[in-house]
């Protein structure tokens, strides 16, 4: 994920599973009007990642501090979740 203006990933997003697709709303956008729809996201072994200002890539994780492992790929149909850009970069 990357913002078109900055080229960097938004810090906070909300995602919703709609069938096989992942609807992504950037912070401040309504969930019923997603900013991005990733078709067939749940048919793949996919992970949602973003590039930070440092140039490193980070996975999006649950904004609930209790579970750093909760990711978009674990959503059931119709469920939504708030995600934040994680702190552990990909090597």
Image: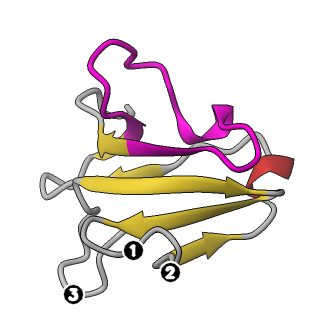
Residue 62 x %, y %:
39, 32
Q: Earlier in the sequence, mark 3 or mark 2?
A: 3
Magenta stretch in the rendered image: 59-82
Q: Is residue 1 visible?
A: no
Q: Secondary structure at mark 2?
A: loop
Residue 70 disc label: none
Residue 5 disc label: 3
Q: Is residue 85 left or right of residue 23?
A: left
Residue 30 disc label: 1
Q: Are marks 2 and 1 in contact (CB under 8 Å)?
A: yes
Residue 28 x %, y %:
25, 71
**Residue drawn at (51%, 54%), measured in percent from left and top?**
15
Q: Are marks 3 and 2 in contact (CB under 8 Å)?
A: no
- Judge by depth and name the residue closer to the eye, 10 or 51: 10
User: Which quadrant of the figure has residue 60?
Assistant: top left
Residue 33 disc label: 2
Residue 26, placed above or below residue 12 = below
Q: Secondary structure at mark 3?
A: loop
Residue 74, placed above or below residue 82 = above
């Amino acid at each position: 994920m990357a913002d078109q203006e900055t080229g960097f990933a938004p810090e906070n997003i909300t995602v919703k599973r709609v069938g096989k697709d992942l609807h992504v709303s950037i912070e401040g956008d309504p969930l019923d009007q997603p900013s991005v729809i990733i078709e067939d996201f749940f048919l793949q072994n996919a992970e949602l990642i973003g590039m930070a200002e440092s140039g490193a890539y980070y996975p999006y994780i649950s904004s609930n501090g209790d579970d750093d492992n909760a990711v978009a790929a674990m959503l059931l149909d119709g469920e939504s979740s708030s995600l934040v850009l994680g702190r552990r970069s990909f090597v």
